[in-house]
């Protein structure tokens, strides 16, 4: 898989799409455990041998809730470097340090620290961002969905919101 698909999703074709579809379902157990049981998730990921099954699939570290980013945010730089090294060995020559710009104040601090990790390990950077809906007119439906997921109402001033 050509890593430029990260910037140009339209370049995904045939086998690449099949690999991503096959990758999505096996990863679900990892997604549900990664926040609270990162070591177990790593073991599960390795045991599932996903990188070997999908030799062209790139590895990304994730958003602010990703393991390396969380370590950077907490100032645990040695842990962040060690974790990023572990993933870079699991995804040799296809693990990317992911930077985002999303108006969250903590993101700027984390991005600077992630760049330090990337420089130390000589890992490439990739710029990404979350997309919660495609069309502006879907924003209200997304707000309602967030309220349902978080047990809030649209009238609650403390409900979860996204700035963009």
Image (cartoon, rainbow, N blue to C red):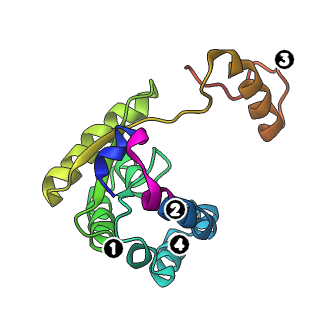
User: Residue sitting at 81 percent across and 21 percent down?
Assistant: 156
Task: Please provide percent x and percent y for residue 104.
Answer: 46, 28
Which dot, 1 or 3, sits closer to the camera? 1
Task: Please provide percent x and percent y for residue 53.
Answer: 44, 77
Q: CA distance from mark 1 to mark 2?
A: 21 Å
Q: CA distance from mark 3 to mark 4?
A: 38 Å
| SS category of the residue bearing label 1 | helix
Which dot, 2 or 3, sits closer to the camera? 2
User: Residue sitting at 44 percent across and 28 percent down?
Assistant: 102
Q: CA distance from mark 1 to mark 4?
A: 13 Å
Mark 2 closeness class: few <14, some 14–19, many ≥20 residues within 10 Å = few
The residue where tag 3 is placed is: 155
Name the residue nearer the viewer: 108 or 94.
94
User: What mark, if any, has residue 18 been given in the picture?
Assistant: 2
User: Residue sitting at 26 percent across and 61 percent down?
Assistant: 81
Q: Are marks 1 and 2 in contact (CB under 8 Å)?
A: no
Q: CA distance from mark 1 to mark 3?
A: 46 Å
Quarter of the rendering containing residue 60:
bottom left
Name the residue nearer the viewer: 144 or 154.
144
User: What mark, if any, has residue 41 been given in the picture?
Assistant: 4
Nearest to N terminus: mark 1 or mark 2: 2
| SS category of the residue bearing label 4 | helix
């Amino acid at each position: 898989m050509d890593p430029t698909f990260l910037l140009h999703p339209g370049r995904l074709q045939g086998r690449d799409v099949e690999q991503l579809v096959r990758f999505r379902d096996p990863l679900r157990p990892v997604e549900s455990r990664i926040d609270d049981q990162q070591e177990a998730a790593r073991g599960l990921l390795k045991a599932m041998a996903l990188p070997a099954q999908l030799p062209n699939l790139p590895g990304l570290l994730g958003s602010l809730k990703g393991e390396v980013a969380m370590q950077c945010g907490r100032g645990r730089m040695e842990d962040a470097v060690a974790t990023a090294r572990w993933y870079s060995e699991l995804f040799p020559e296809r693990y990317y340090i992911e930077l985002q710009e999303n108006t969250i104040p903590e993101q700027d601090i984390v991005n600077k620290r992630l760049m330090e990790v990337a420089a130390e390990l000589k890992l490439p950077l990739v710029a990404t961002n979350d997309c919660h809906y495609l069309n502006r007119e879907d924003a209200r439906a997304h707000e309602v969905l967030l309220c349902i997921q978080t047990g809030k109402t649209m009238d609650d001033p403390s409900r979860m919101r996204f700035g963009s």
